[in-house]
């Protein structure tokens, strides 16, 4: 009973103390409250005195200790009250926050109620729990990497139909392993044409100036049956590349890049990056467009037909821009001059140089300096050049007998002012080619320069918000992504030999294909799109005048493809 | 059969006629797209610090049009004022609830057509903040160092005015572009040497400190702006009037001392500024009408003109900007009249000094 009474009194004093601190209004009020407190403490002292032989010495000692602590708190409170009174007297006007109106709302009352030690301890405990949980989760459930890394990828899932049917393949080396050839002609197919996996990040992050050293590593897998309408014969078209397990999995990008210019200063800074390793070649528009932004399912014919620019290459390439202008309307950046130049093996991806000569590539592009709201915005003109050397082999012995010149020149003009977009690209290849049969070629066999030419014209109309940075980054609680729809038509032609004279060279006719593609793309989630393409491919007549099943006069096709990224 | 064909043809013509009728000024939209040049931390669709943000936080505009079946589509752009410009340029915004001077001006300079209908607020303290361990005591001590601002926003002009005030230009520093959250992080990691940012939360966390403070200087900060797209304004003048009137009501409510704490706590929910930042930043404002002021008075007009000159001086625009026909005060005047608030707010002269004092009482109408 005695213990209960003492505790109750102590509690009352504590309550009174905290009450005083919470509602200190003025010096007079504080003085009254302090006087009341003193009386209560005095009563406690009186009760704490030994009252008889039955008094428990330990309890008395506890009470004395409590009284001592209460006195100390009282002294602190008195000092605070004095300081408050002095400050209040010195102030020209009373602070509004300390004068609560009777009908003050909860927000105001909350703002004027101090936190107790218990409140602080509660927050502290929550915070410690959070730290513990985070540390443990990080340790046990979160994958870690040695350096900063972003993982991404793209997967394509496709259904296609064509008429006339794709001709049956023939048995060849590609049927090794678990693959089988296409036994009969087919109109339809389901495919996973491509699945990519990429890793990108910083090896060294320069916080001061942003001159970062970054890396890129990418892999791609492709179905053996991906096939391509541009393939020259049914075997490669239907069977694809030889592999032992039915697909291919290759390194695509493997590069290091160093920024010579600051990258964290702002958009008005020029850029300059040297990339070493396996990478896309800076030639034209389509050859270096990634899957996410390419509107058409099949790339333009020349990008796969012209060697050198149709694959990634290993080497050193410097890319940069100059004469930057920024329209601060929406921080729109345009560069009068973009440039890229470099030296590569020329033998394609994942291969050492296959001869003693290096290939050279260069590109220059000009963008009209314009405000974001002006019509000429995003009008870009570019020229590209690739100087390479190809091995010419005797196809009987497979021995390389000559190193041939191979050049690619390109011109492109594009205009992207949403909702409209127009792109035209021209590419021409010149390749030394044996005049006679390659099966009997020697080091002194005469050659001629074969010219091949490809070009496409693309008109697009886009509606929706996906390609607007402001809308893409809109603050939302849910997994929001603006939708966009894109309709386009593309005219694409490729002529493998522009001579087009059967009397001079039989192979120069029957080698031209013109593909018209009508398409609709629906971008319905971040990095995910549904593409529907209708194709009409027309081939020119061969020198014999007779079309074959492998190369019919006209082919219609329909492709439906989901492409999603992560 | 012929009769049926005729009926179908007439119906089709009637439908065509109905759908091709030009919209009259009496029409109401099905949706009003209202944009804020900012967002909460972590991409939360929230913003604080002004009475237009109260109109969102307390669902005032939603309530205004609820009975009409008009949906309000709120947009919050982490890309701030420049992103709002992009949205409007692409026909995706009808009304802006508080655009800073720089993006407002460059937008107009490049052809964006809007009508300024009221101000979203004015004045405010400005701080020069450095990392906690910095030895800098003045702007001069930071010469040649890295300063951060969110380029393209009003903050860029504010920083340039600071530098100008102390005899420097942006060329004397390395100025990098960071948004508000990134600036706080960069101060914590010493990746920048200084920035204009409200310091109190950072100070409490031991991350940064304020070395200089300019309180409510009308030459350092400029009023914010509420505008409506010209096309929207021409098509739906009654709707514009209702938006403005409701905003003025909210502005009035927001100036009541009794709502001070409620506002701060609501504003702090966005996370972009902590409660303590609002609390301490506004401590020096005994009368909330000093900053929460929707008027398009002489000070507003002079400020806009000054900002245009500064924007040209700092080479942030290439073209001249005229304010002729830009400011449309009729909606604000009507709202003030309808709500009997014509003399409620103080009116300032071109120099930012009080020209006509505010009504002496805060009593409700």
Image (cartoon, coloured by chain):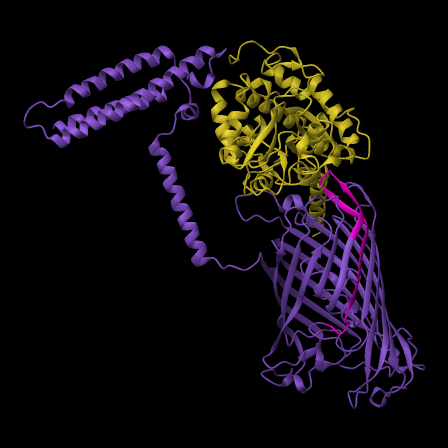
Chain colours: A purple, B yellow
In the rendered image, residue B188, in percent from the top left (x then y), is placed at 55, 41
Q: Is residue A385 left or right of residue B150?
A: right
Viewer-proximal residue among B64 and A509: A509
Camera-nearest residue between B146 and A264: B146
Q: Main secondary structure of the magenta part?
A: strand
> Quadrant of the image for the C terminus of chain A?
bottom right
Residue B202, x across and y down, in percent = 53, 35
Q: Is residue A331 found inside the magenta-colored segment of the image? A: yes
Magenta highlight range: A321-348
In front: A58, or B170?
A58
Residue A480 appearing in the image: yes
Q: Residue at point 68% right, 61% down?
A: A256
Instruction: From this view, report whether residue A530 is shown above or below residue B291.
Output: below
User: Residue placed at 37% from the left, 19% from the top?
Assistant: A80
The image position of residue A218, as x and y in percent, is 63, 65
- The residue positioned farthest toward the front in the image shown: B135
Q: Is residue A37 left or right of residue A183?
A: left
Q: Which residue is located at x 66 percent, y 73 percent?
A: A226
Q: Residue furthest left?
A: A53
Residue at the image point whose x is 47% and y is 24% from the top: B261
């Amino acid at each position: 009973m005695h213990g209960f009474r003492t505790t109750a009194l102590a509690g009352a004093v504590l309550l009174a103390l905290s009450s005083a601190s919470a509602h200190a209004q003025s010096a007079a009020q504080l003085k009254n409250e302090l006087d009341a407190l003193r009386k209560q403490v005095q009563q406690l002292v009186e009760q704490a005195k030994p009252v008889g032989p039955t008094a428990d010495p330990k309890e008395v000692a506890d009470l004395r200790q409590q009284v001592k602590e209460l006195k100390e708190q009282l002294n602190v409170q008195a000092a605070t009250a004095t300081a408050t009174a002095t400050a209040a007297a010195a102030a020209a006007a009373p602070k509004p926050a300390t004068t609560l109106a009777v009908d003050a709302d909860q927000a105001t009352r909350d703002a004027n109620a101090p936190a107790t030690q218990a409140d602080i301890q509660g927050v502290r405990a929550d915070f410690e729990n959070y730290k513990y949980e985070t540390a443990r989760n990080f340790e046990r459930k979160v994958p870690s990497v040695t350096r900063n890394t972003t993982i991404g990828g793209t997967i394509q899932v496709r259904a296609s139909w064509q008429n006339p049917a794709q001709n049956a393949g023939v048995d060849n080396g590609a049927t090794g392993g678990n693959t089988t050839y296409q036994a009969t002609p087919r109109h339809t197919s389901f495919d996973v044409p491509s699945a990519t996996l990429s890793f990108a990040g910083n090896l060294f992050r320069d916080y001061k100036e942003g001159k970062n050293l970054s890396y890129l590593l990418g892999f791609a897998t492709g179905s053996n049956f991906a096939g391509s309408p541009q393939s020259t014969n049914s075997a490669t078209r239907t069977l694809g590349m030889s592999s032992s397990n039915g697909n291919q999995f290759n390194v695509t990008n493997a590069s290091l890049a160093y920024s010579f210019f600051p990258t964290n200063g702002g958009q008005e800074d020029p850029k300059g990056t040297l990339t070493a390793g396996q990478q896309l070649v800076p030639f034209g528009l389509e050859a270096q467009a990634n899957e996410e932004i390419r509107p058409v399912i099949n790339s333009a014919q020349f990008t796969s037909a012209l060697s050198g620019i149709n694959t990634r290459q290993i080497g050193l390439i410097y890319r940069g821009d100059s004469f930057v202008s920024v329209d601060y309307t929406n921080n729109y950046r345009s560069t009068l001059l973009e440039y890229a130049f470099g030296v590569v093996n020329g033998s394609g991806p994942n291969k050492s140089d296959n001869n003693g000569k290096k290939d050279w590539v260069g590109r220059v592009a000009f963008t009209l300096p314009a405000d974001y709201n002006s019509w000429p915005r995003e009008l870009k003109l570019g020229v590209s050049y690739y100087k390479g050397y190809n091995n010419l082999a005797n196809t009987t012995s497979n021995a390389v007998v000559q190193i041939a010149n191979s050049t690619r020149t390109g011109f492109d003009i594009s205009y992207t002012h949403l909702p409209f977009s127009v792109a035209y690209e021209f590419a021409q290849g010149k390749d030394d080619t044996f005049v006679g049969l390659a099966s009997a070629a020697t080091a002194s066999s005469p050659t001629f320069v074969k010219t091949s030419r490809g070009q496409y014209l693309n008109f697009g109309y886009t509606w929706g918000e996906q390609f607007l940075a402001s809308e893409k980054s809109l603050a939302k609680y849910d997994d929001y992504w603006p939708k966009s729809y894109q309709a386009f038509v593309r005219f694409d032609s490729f002529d493998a030999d522009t001579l087009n004279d059967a009397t001079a060279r039989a192979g120069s006719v029957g080698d031209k294909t013109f593909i018209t593609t009508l398409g609709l793309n629906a971008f319905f989630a971040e990095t995910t799109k549904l593409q529907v393409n209708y194709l009409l491919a027309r081939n020119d007549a061969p020198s014999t005048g007779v079309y074959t099943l492998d190369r019919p006069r006209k082919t219609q096709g329909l492709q439906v493809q989901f492409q999603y990224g992560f | 059969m012929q009769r049926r064909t005729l009926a179908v043809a007439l119906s089709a013509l009637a439908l065509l006629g109905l759908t091709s009728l030009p919209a009259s000024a009496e029409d109401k939209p099905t949706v009003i797209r209202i944009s804020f040049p900012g967002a909460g931390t972590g991409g939360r669709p929230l913003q604080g610090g002004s009475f237009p943000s109260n109109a969102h936080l307390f669902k005032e505009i939603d309530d205004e049009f609820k009975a009409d079946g008009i949906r309000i589509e709120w947009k919050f752009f982490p890309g701030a004022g420049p992103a709002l410009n992009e949205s409007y340029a692409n026909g995706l915004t009808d009304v802006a609830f508080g655009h800073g001077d720089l993006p407002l001006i460059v937008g107009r300079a490049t052809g964006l057509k809007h009508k300024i209908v009221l101000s979203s607020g004015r004045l405010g303290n400005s701080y020069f903040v450095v990392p906690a361990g910095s030895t800098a005591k003045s702007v001069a001590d930071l010469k040649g160092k890295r300063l951060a601002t969110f380029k393209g926003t009003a903050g860029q002009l504010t920083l340039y005015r600071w530098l100008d005030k102390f005899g420097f230009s942006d060329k004397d520093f390395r100025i990098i572009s960071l948004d508000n959250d990134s600036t706080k992080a960069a101060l914590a990691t010493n990746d920048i040497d200084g920035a204009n940012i409200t310091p109190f939360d950072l100070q409490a966390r031991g991350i940064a400190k304020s070395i200089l403070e300019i309180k409510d200087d009308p030459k350092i900060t400029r009023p914010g702006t509420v505008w409506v797209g010209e096309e929207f304004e021409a098509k739906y003048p009654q709707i514009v009037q209702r938006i403005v009137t409701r905003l003025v009501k909210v502005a009035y409510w927001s100036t009541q001392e009794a709502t001070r704490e409620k506002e701060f706590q609501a504003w702090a929910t966005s996370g972009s500024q902590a409660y303590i930042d609002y609390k301490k930043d506004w401590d020096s404002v005994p009368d909330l009408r000093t900053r929460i002021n929707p008027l398009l008075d002489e000070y507003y007009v002079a400020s806009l003109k000054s900002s245009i000159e500064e924007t040209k001086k700092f080479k942030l625009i290439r073209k001249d900007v005229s304010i002729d026909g830009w400011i449309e005060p009729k909606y604000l005047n009507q709202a003030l009249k309808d709500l009997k608030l014509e003399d409620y707010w103080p009116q300032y002269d071109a120099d930012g000094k009080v020209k006509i004092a505010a009504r002496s009482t805060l009593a409700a109408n």
